[in-house]
Amino acid sequence: MFLIAGLGNIGEKYSLTRHNVGFMVVDGATKTQQHSSSISKANFNSDVIKTDQTLFAKPKTYMNNSGIAVRAIKEYYKIENKNIIVIHDDLDLPFGCVKFKIGGGHGGHNGLRSIDAHIGNNYIRVRIGIGKPAVKDEVANYVLSNFSKEELKQLEDIITHTLNAIKAIENGMCIDEVKSKFTLK
């Protein structure tokens, strides 16, 4: 079984923000799932959709506490870290860039910092570039700002591409091959 966790913040006001690109990918994945069911367990602190081989989660803990939700689901279903895929925004990548890796540092991303603290850092990461503001002091406002209409249109293709990569991982493609075939620069 795989756990696909998209990171973001709950609430309508955050739904189209750069920080919520992980939620957007999970939404894209679950809208077409025909044989799925919602799971409601209070300790998961997440919206969870289950298919035959995959759990899709959107933590309700807000970004900074994402690890609480990921750990609860991981422990309940006894999912190994190698079968956990976390999708998140990345300021250090230009908008539209998609990269894949296992492990590494959190790079100042509080959602990853929380997950690392709760389950370690040896899980698969899907890094989706959102670009960064010209002034470093504007980072908090930038990640919580909405994507432009043009960016949202481009995100449709980026999300589809990302979901194809995730499906390849679920079907056994090794991370090096995924990097080679699905990285967008």
Image (cartoon, rainbow, N blue to C red):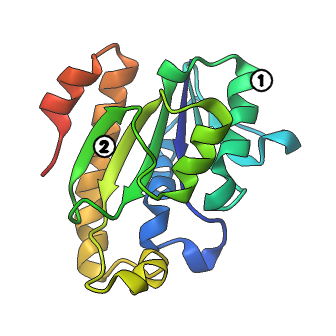
Q: Is residue 157 left or right of residue 68?
A: left
Query: In the image, which disc is placed on residue 30?
Result: none
Residue 85 horizontal/vertical position (percent): 47, 33
Left or right position of 123 against 131: right
Vertical order, 61 against 133 (above or below): above
Quarter in which the N terminus is drawn: top right
Label 2: state its secondary structure: helix
Instruction: Give the secondary structure at mark 1.
Output: helix
- Relative depth, front residue between 63 and 114: 114
Amino acid type assigned to the residue bearing label 1 in the image: Tyr
Question: Which residue is situated farthest in the top direction here?
Answer: 172
Label 2 sits on residue? 162
Res 140 seen here: yes
Q: Amino acid at mark 2?
A: Thr
Quadrant location of residue 143?
Answer: bottom left
Rounded to the nearest angstrom, the CA distance separating label 2 from label 1 is 27 Å
In the displayed structure image, the side of residue 126 where residue 182 appears, left or right = left
Depth check, mark 2 against mark 1: the one in front is 1
Q: Looking at the rendering, which quadrant does residue 67 occupy?
A: top right
**Residue count near mark 2 (Cα–Cα under 10 Å), binned few <14, some 14–19, many ≥20:** many
Closer to us: 33 or 67: 67
* Rendered position, 158 above or below 119: below
Q: Nearer the viewer, residue 168 or 141?
A: 141
